[in-house]
Amino acid sequence: LVVHALKVAAPGALIVASASCQSSGPEKWESQLRAASKEAGRRFRQVGTVGLPPDFPTQLIHPQARYLKCHLLLVDG
């Protein structure tokens, strides 16, 4: 879905790329975003990230518990 959004987004567009998946940690999601950029032939800059709110604490030794991953992407020209 991110690939398709990048292909049609105008330069300067903001894309909210979000995943709520416990089977992959934040590092895998960021890797998938980089792969989407490469596949779409478009670049973006990450201008913000959001995860779980403070009332959903997680342990650092269990990265899969941080299942909510949300990035605000600014599409380059």
Image (cartoon, grey):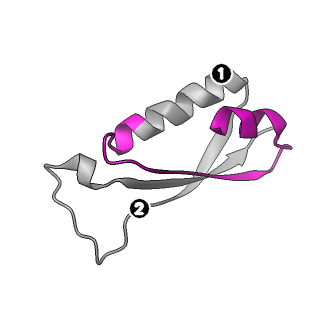
User: Which contiguous range is marked in magenta?
Assistant: 1-28
The disc at residue 51 is: 2
Task: State yes or no: discs 1 and 2 in contact (Cβ < 8 Å).
Answer: no
State the residue at coordinates (78%, 32%).
Answer: 7
Determine the residue positioned at 69% across, 33% down: 43
Judge whether residue 4 is colored magenta.
yes
Between residue 44 and residue 23, name the one nearer to us. 23
Give the answer, above or below, for where 71 lies relative to 57.
Answer: above
Rendered location of residue 14, percent (x, y): 73, 54
Residue at image x 67%, y 40%? 44
- The spot of residue 56 in percent (x, y) is 28, 71
Helix, strand or loop for disc 1: helix
* Mark positioned earlier in the residue sequence (1 or 2): 1
For label 1, the residue is: 39
What amino acid type is highlighted by mark number 2?
Answer: Gly
Amino acid type shown at disc 1:
Glu
Q: Is residue 28 left or right of residue 47?
A: left
Residue name at image x 45 percent, y 31 percent: 31
Helix, strand or loop at disc 2?
Answer: loop
Q: Position of residue 72 (x, y in %)?
A: 60, 55
Nearer to us in this view, 41 or 8: 8
Q: Which mark is on residue 10? A: none
Q: CA distance from mark 1 to mark 2?
A: 25 Å
